[in-house]
Amino acid sequence: MPSGKSDRTSSFAFSRLPLPARDFGNRIVDLNFDFQTPDRVGLAIRIVAASLHDADEDPDATEARASALPLSVRILQLLRLVSTIEGTKTLELTRSCPRPDCAEPIELALPLEGLIEYGARPVTARTNLAWSVPGASGTTITLRRPTGDDQRGWQKRRYTTRAEAARHLLETIAVDGREHLDTMSREAEGDLANAMSEFDPLVGFQMSTECPHCDQPVTLPVDLEDACLLRLEREHRCALDTIHELAASYGWTESEILRIPRNRRRHYLNRIHAATSVRRDPGATTR
């Protein structure tokens, strides 16, 4: 049976979607994230925790709350944070055609609003998946969605084979009927994995499209969390560059700059760039 902690998390996650969010890159805390860390799970958890943090709550408690969220809810929150970036309507990424005779790059532009709606529907509809074991009448295995706590636990273990890792994953998220996992065939395990993909579509997200180079239909796996982290990293670098330019020109502090609305920051940056152009080309004019 799941622990009391998991039960409380499920109640929090599913009764209050969408989770609160605010513009990314507009607070001091957003400048502190280390996007070069190899711990991508920890980075994603900390970013989500910062978006949920309440001034009255201990930061460690907020991170623990974010770590206990289902992975799909965490991805939803990252998608929502990306959607707060000014002018960002799509999640853009490049994947290679999986056909060996092609392997050309395929550019994707996934609509954020559609992704969020697509992922939120199954999350809010059901907390657990009740799956009937094929060929075993009345035998059911109930699974919950994996959480950040689960991922951190898996990272601490060493697995000798992919099959061992997959079996331990199922054992971890099995709420009921765990004993039936030992007697399942490989084919049944594959059917269960497919059922989990439909139940939790953002975690193993796949995009079906046509390769523009070989004109063949292809299915591309997309790590949505990693794609979100890469987009947030670009916004993080942009925020640091903006602060550097404004601080160097006007002497403002980080906090003072972040309190300035984005449209005014752009105006000041344009003035800086225009003045720089005039110094390089005295014949240029600026207004």
Image (spheres, rainbow, N blue to C red):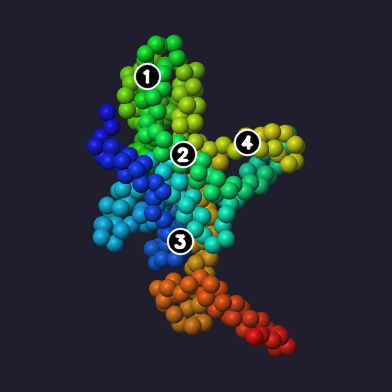
* Residue contact at pointers 1 and 2, CB within 8 angstroms: no
Instruction: Say which quadrant the N terminus sits in.
Output: top left
Under mark 4, the amino acid is: Ser
Residue type at tag 3: Asp
Find the distance from the CA under tag 3 to the CA under tag 4. 31 Å
Circles 3 and 2: CB distance less than 8 Å? no
Q: Amino acid at mark 1?
A: Thr
The residue identified by callout 1 is: 140
Residue closer to the observer: 157 or 8: 8
Residue depicted at x 70% and y 42%:
104
Q: Quadrant of the C terminus?
A: bottom right
Q: Name the image quarter holding residue 215.
A: top right
Name the N-terminal-most of marks 3 and 4.
3
Which structural element holds mark 1?
strand
Please state the horizontal and vertical placement of residue 105, each as a whole percent of the image.
68, 44
Q: Is residue 231 left or right of residue 68?
A: right
| Sequence-wise first label, 1 or 2 | 2
- Which amino acid type corresponds to the residue marked 2 in the rendered image? Arg
| Residue ranking furthest to the right | 214
Residue 217's x, y, as percent?
A: 69, 33
Q: CA distance from mark 3 to mark 1?
A: 43 Å
